Image (tube, rainbow, N blue to C red):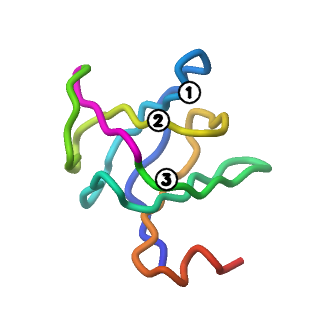
Amino acid sequence: MPRRIGEVVNYYPRVRAASIRVDEGELHDGDLIRIVGHGHEITEPVRSLELDHRRIHTAYAGETIGVSVEAPVHPRDAVYVLEEPDDAAED
């Protein structure tokens, strides 16, 4: 079951990265995330997490972190962590 952890704050197209505010829970390097917005949805593993331009392995509630993304996303898009492998097949 997907678990909402936060939302996109900004997207940086030149470096294909998003700022994500973690509102609850944790986000780990390697987690599978789903980003959902108006008319789009992407699902991909977390390949890179940064806090204040430093690489980290875990982000916690209250932090705004940078995450590399393969497709464009938009501010206010919801970010979910997929907790079970079958979550990616739903919809």
C-alpha distance separating marks 2 and 3: 13 Å
Quadrant of the rendered image containing residue 32: bottom left
Q: Against 68, is 42 above or below?
A: below
Left or right: 91 in relation to 58: right
Disc 1 marks which amino acid? Arg
Q: Which mark is residue 79?
A: 3
C-alpha distance separating marks 1 and 3: 16 Å
Task: Please tell me whether mark 2 sits on a helix, a strand or a loop.
Answer: strand
From the viewer's side, name the closer residue of 11 and 86: 86
Left or right: 58 in relation to 32: left
Q: Which residues are magenta?
A: 47-52
Nearest to the eye among marks 1 and 3: give it: 1
Q: Tags 2 and 3 in contact by the CB under 8 Å rule?
A: no
Q: Earlier in the sequence, mark 2 or mark 1?
A: 1
Task: Please tell me whether mark 1 sits on a helix, a strand or a loop.
Answer: loop
Quadrant that contains the C terminus:
bottom right
Nearest to the eye among marks 2 and 3: give it: 2
Q: Tags 2 and 1 in contact by the CB under 8 Å rule?
A: yes
Q: Which mark is residue 68?
A: 2
From the viewer's side, name the closer residue of 46 and 35: 46
Left or right: 12 in relation to 53: right
Q: Residues within 10 Å of mark 1 (few under 14, many from 20)?
A: some
From the viewer's side, name the closer residue of 45 and 75: 45
Residue at 23% across, 29% down: 51
Q: Position of residue 19 (x, y in %)?
A: 42, 31
Disc 3 marks which amino acid? Val
Q: Residues within 10 Å of mark 3 (few under 14, many from 20)?
A: many
- Residue to which mark 1 is pinned: 16
Disc 2 marks which amino acid? Ser
Q: Residues within 10 Å of mark 2 (few under 14, many from 20)?
A: some
